[in-house]
Amino acid sequence: MLFIKNGHIKTMAGADIENGCVLIGDDGKIAAVGADLALPEGATVIDAGGKLVTPGCVEAHCHIGLHSAAVRWEGADYNESSNPITPHMRAIDGIDPFDEYLQTAVEHGITTACTGPGSANVVGGTFAAIKLVGKRVDKMIVKEAVGMKCAFGENPKGAYGQSGKKMPVTRMGVAAMLRELLYKTRDYMAAKEAGKNPAFDLKLEAMIPVLKKEIPLKAHAHQADDIFTAIRIAKEFDLKLTLDHCTDASRIADELAEDGYPALVGPSFGSKSKVELKNKEFETAGKLYAAGVPVCIITDAPVLPLESLPMCAGLACSAGLPYEEAWRAITINPATHMGIADRVGSLEVGKDGDLVIWNADPLTTVGANHVNTTILEGKVVYSA
């Protein structure tokens, strides 16, 4: 057992607890959270000494482990660029647990990441939610499939359409290819349910959880028209949807609030490296929250280093996102939108014992390293 005492506990499930305690059982799950907990016999004690204690941060959209810190000689593993439609790709088959990005992220307070294919393809495959410590990805999985990656706009057009000879050349082509796949999946699923035994198709099998609303379409969309196309298609097929990046979202926040799909905002830091990023700003998350849109902050690592996630939340906070919502945007909100809030994102009884003890609040204080201790499932995995 592990007993953390005397911390300022930010549970993300209610009010903060001053001078609070967290007890993590031998099973790695949180056994108790409160102000006056009895110290169990035999428990290992960590005195947080008035420091900030939060859930481990959760990244909702990155490519960590597939796009390594040092790209492998044969190339990065995050885009299967042989075909624009590859829903049968699974992130778990490309993640390198020894990618140095994972350990660096842990040292900066990130304990869980949703990682997966890039945005070259119209449909790229499934994202996985993983813990960032381990030698074997199979033992790091929180949830094997948290979303089916699809992409709109410049990226799939640029990857395939520059010659003008291979779809998609236009935004219309991107949407048409996605629709065709969804129609085929719907017919395939109906045939299976009717006992007609259609010829096995791995691509269509991979899309069935999307049609059944078991996982969302995870839509790369920066530009306003692309965001609306993603929403249009999700409504046509009655799908779950997350809107990832949402660079233009502050211009259409009132419209997005009508639909209520989660917005995964970022990366907001860095250069405007392509046309779709011309309206990138730190104010986006705050404007979406004010309009009533559910918001997460993302780094899109390695576009931004994953360890910059708390800093990005702080920049959003300084640009109008309320402080408490900024913390939610990197803890419980991404966990909820990715379907893993039963295990991570808040300090509650029964959830995984993933937490961070901070030397300083990373959302309000600039510093080289804010983390004192990172704990994953009740085990200290980093100590400054």
Image: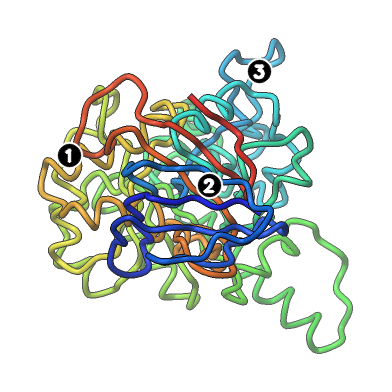
In terms of secondary structure, where does tag 1 sit? loop
Q: Give the spatial CA distance, label 2 vs label 1.
A: 27 Å
Q: Quadrant of residue 199?
A: bottom right
Three-letter amino acid code of the residue under disc 2: Val
Three-letter amino acid code of the residue under disc 1: Phe
Q: Give the spatial CA distance, label 3 vs label 1.
A: 32 Å
Q: Give the spatial CA distance, label 2 vs label 3.
A: 20 Å
Three-letter amino acid code of the residue under disc 3: Gly
Mark positioned earlier in the residue sequence (2 or 3): 3
- Percent across and percent down for residue 71 are 61, 15
Q: Is the residue 271 above or below the residue 57 in the image?
A: above
Residue at figure coordinates x 70%, y 25% from the top left = 98
Residues 164 and 217: in front is: 217
Badge 2 is on which residue? 122
Q: Residues within 10 Å of mark 3 (few under 14, many from 20)?
A: few
> With 142 as the anchor, is 339 left or right in this view?
left
- Percent across and percent down for residue 365 are 21, 31
- Percent across and percent down for residue 360 are 28, 34
- Check contact, mark 2 vs mark 1: CB within 8 A: no
Badge 3 is on which residue? 75
In terms of secondary structure, where does tag 2 sit? loop
Number of labelled discs?
3
Q: Quadrant of the N terminus?
A: bottom right
Badge 1 is on which residue? 282
